[in-house]
Image: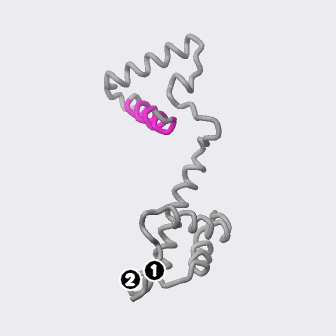
Amino acid sequence: MSARKGQTRLKEIASQISQDKQLSPEDKEFLVKALIEISDGEDAETALAVKFKKGERKSRQTRVAKINKALVMVLLATAKAPKSEGGLGLTLQDAVAMVKAEWGKLPSEQTLRRYWNDVKNTQERDFEIKTD
């Protein structure tokens, strides 16, 4: 189980406990085992399945940045699409400038263009729309 899934599981268990709901047998067994391991001196993050691997980030800010990056790529694809197809018909440079001006706390325009090229090259769908 990944550390993110472990965090989600712990949040769900905490929510159930706070609402005085009955825990599932699996969740109860997981908690009992983890608490026994912790009381025996095991690392709490490992016992609770929330230990991150070396180099993994665990902050909320990192998760938000990942979501923002995905949203920006969608906005850029729409801005670059021709007007006849519901887009704005902008160049990549103009689209990036528009998104950057309207949305705070984004990387630089140069970085957004690099992200676009990275995503464009790895996606199955081609973001370049062919003209008639």
- In the image, the segment drawn in magenta is 3-16
- Residue 88, horizontal then vertical, whole percent: 47, 83
Membership of 13 in magenta stretch = yes
Give the residue furthest to the top. Answer: 40
- Residue 128, horizontal then vertical, whole percent: 47, 76
Q: Quadrant location of the C terminus? A: bottom left
Between 43 and 125, the residue placed more toward the observer is 125
Membership of 69 in magenta stretch = no
Residue 97: give its label: none
Above or below for 8 versus 103:
above
Above or below for 17 versus 119:
above
Residue at x-position 48% and y-position 19%: 34
Q: Secondary structure at mark 2?
A: helix
Give the crowd class for mark 2: few <14, some 14-19, many >=20 residues within 10 Å. Answer: few
Give the residue furthest to the bottom. Answer: 132
Q: Are marks 1 and 2 in contact (CB under 8 Å)?
A: yes
Residue to which mark 2 is pinned: 85
Q: Mark 1 is on which residue type? A: Ala
Give me the C-alpha separation between circle 1 and circle 2: 7 Å
Q: Mark 2 is on which residue type? A: Glu
Residue to which mark 1 is pinned: 81
Residue at x-position 37% and y-position 31%: 16
Give the crowd class for mark 1: few <14, some 14-19, many >=20 residues within 10 Å. Answer: many
> Looking at the magenta stretch, what is its main secondary structure?
helix
Q: Quadrant location of the N terminus? A: top left
Q: Secondary structure at mark 1?
A: loop
- Residue 44, horizontal then vertical, whole percent: 57, 23
- Residue 66, horizontal then vertical, whole percent: 55, 54
